[in-house]
Image (cartoon, rainbow, N blue to C red):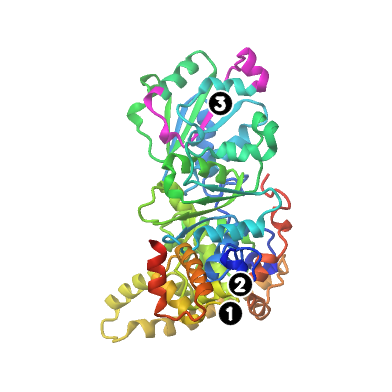
Amino acid sequence: MEWYEELDFDENPLIVETRYVGNREVLEESYYTIVSGNILVIEGTDGTGKTKILKEMIKRFGGHGRVAYVSCKDMEKELNVEDVLAKRNGFLGWLLKKYPRNMVLLLDDVEHLSAKNMERIKYFFDTNHLRAIVITTKDYQTLNLGESVKQRVRKTVQLRPLSEYEAVQVVQDRLGEDVLNDRVIKETYRQSDRNLEKFLSNCELLCKAYVANKNLTEGDVKDVLARGVK
Amino acid sequence: MNNTIWFKDLGFYSNPFSIKPAAFHDQVLGYDKVVDEISQGILNNKVVVLQGAYGNGKSTILRRILNDFGGKKQVIYYSCNRADGRLNVKELLNGRYGFLGKLFDMKPKDMILLLDEAQTLGPKDYERIESYCQEGYFTSVVLVGNQMDMKGLPHQWKSRLHEVALNALNDTVAVHIVRKRIGDLMLLPDDMISEVYKISDNNVRLLLKNSEEVCKRAVETGRKKVSIEFLRQVFPSLNEKKEDTKTTENVAEPKPEKHAPVAEKPKVEKKETKKEEKKVAEAPPKKVHVYKPEEYKSKMQHSAEELLNSPTEEIFGDEQYY
């Protein structure tokens, strides 16, 4: 029996998508960027929710065949924007090189792209095939975008890691308030170096421990996590 | 919910400060001479090289020329940053006849070649273009780029080379450019536009970007008019510069930061009111804007979820620039 079944959940509640918590300004900024047709750079370290923002944008603008999401991390070859655009109209579109207009491009982990490639993206932006571009990166300073692309960027926003209070919200949205109490969650968040992905997997460990021992306290968190890693 | 976007609240359908060169390209303000020069060069079968810094309107000028000469299937326009590797001139020529052209290798004669972003081209590319020129496929070539190496150009072109340089626009033209986009909207007065132009290092694209920022902030904070003080809030760098000049002028004053704006504010307002009266007297405003700052403020108090759940179709509704 899985741990969540013992807690009366049908499926693992920690993987379920829930509402967006924290960094509302960044969310609004990216919304405005797409509506007004600009380029936005979102900068944030690991696990601050860069991809989550892009996913929210897909949720918001998706469904009309206008949003293209590309994760540059797991690309084997160089990104070919022309193909991404042309394939929107199916095989025939790709064959006849029919490019759609007014598309939104969401680029995840852009540091894996070359400057030459960004130039090509710039071309499609200029011709309004791409209406807006949202880029996420770890560090904007070291990013090799090319001067002319950098000038087109409207704004760079930084994602801050969630506050402890927001981390509590994230977990309690999914688990309810009974399972883990505030202090335990806060301690776990501190132990996970403020990295959301790590934090959620750590929470799973804690839930398993909770099933065995219903009286979890702040002090136990370190032990549980240390055991879990082994 | 779409009303919370500032330009929609002002009555615009889309962002008036779009930085894409495709938008508003039918009329180029301030560069009439340059456009004439290039057109003359094309008619005289010359090789025209246009150089200028980023964001000063090179591509916009090229699009204007494309507009002038287009329509007779005599022009090939190509942006070199599109190419994967080398520039393929043969493919460009074949493309004129579509799919059949590729099949039978048909090439048109006497074409005009417009190349954007030509700084990526090397000497070999130039030589290939030159060989096609000699065979009579191209009558004239226009190269547009940021910084081109002129030494790489083939020696045959030296006699027919025509260089055109782009200079920065002056204040009045900058005001015209912004006015063309937003009409006589009183939110952003003329003197403020030239102020923004100064901050933007006399760069047109930066001007558009910055004025978008100014208008956005102004509407969101519920202002009816942008003042110098507000500009200083938006651009802290302006503050520093002004302070420097003021400290050199009035050394006796202990706190120039706080005094200066207070002293300046009534002057600016007087000017604005005068202008407003004049404009009202000369011509009644053409557009009626439904912009009320008080209403906007209440609208701004929405939650992120509402923002995410509003309908999207209006954004993708139609294609605006073509």
Q: Which residue is mark 2?
A: A7
Segment tinted magenta in the rendering: B97-124
Quadrant including the C terminus of chain B:
top right
Return the x and y of residue B87 as percentages of the image width and height.
48, 26
- Residue A193, horizontal then vertical, whole percent: 39, 68
Q: Is residue B111 or residue A12 the one in the foreground?
A: A12
Looking at the rendered structure, whether the residues under marks 2 and 1 are on a common chain is answered as yes
The answer to whether residue A92 is above or below residue A142 is above
Q: Quadrant of residue B311?
A: bottom right
Residue tagged by mark 1?
A177
- CA gap, disc 2 and disc 1: 12 Å
With respect to residue A149, does A228 lie above or below? below
Residue for badge 3 = B112
Circle 3 Cα neighbour tier, 10 Å, few/some/many (<14 / 14–19 / ≥20): many
Question: Is there one chain holding both mark 1 and mark 3?
Answer: no
Kindly state the secondary structure of the residue where label 3 is placed.
strand
The residue shown at (32%, 76%) is: B246
Q: Nearer the viewer, residue A161 or A155?
A: A161
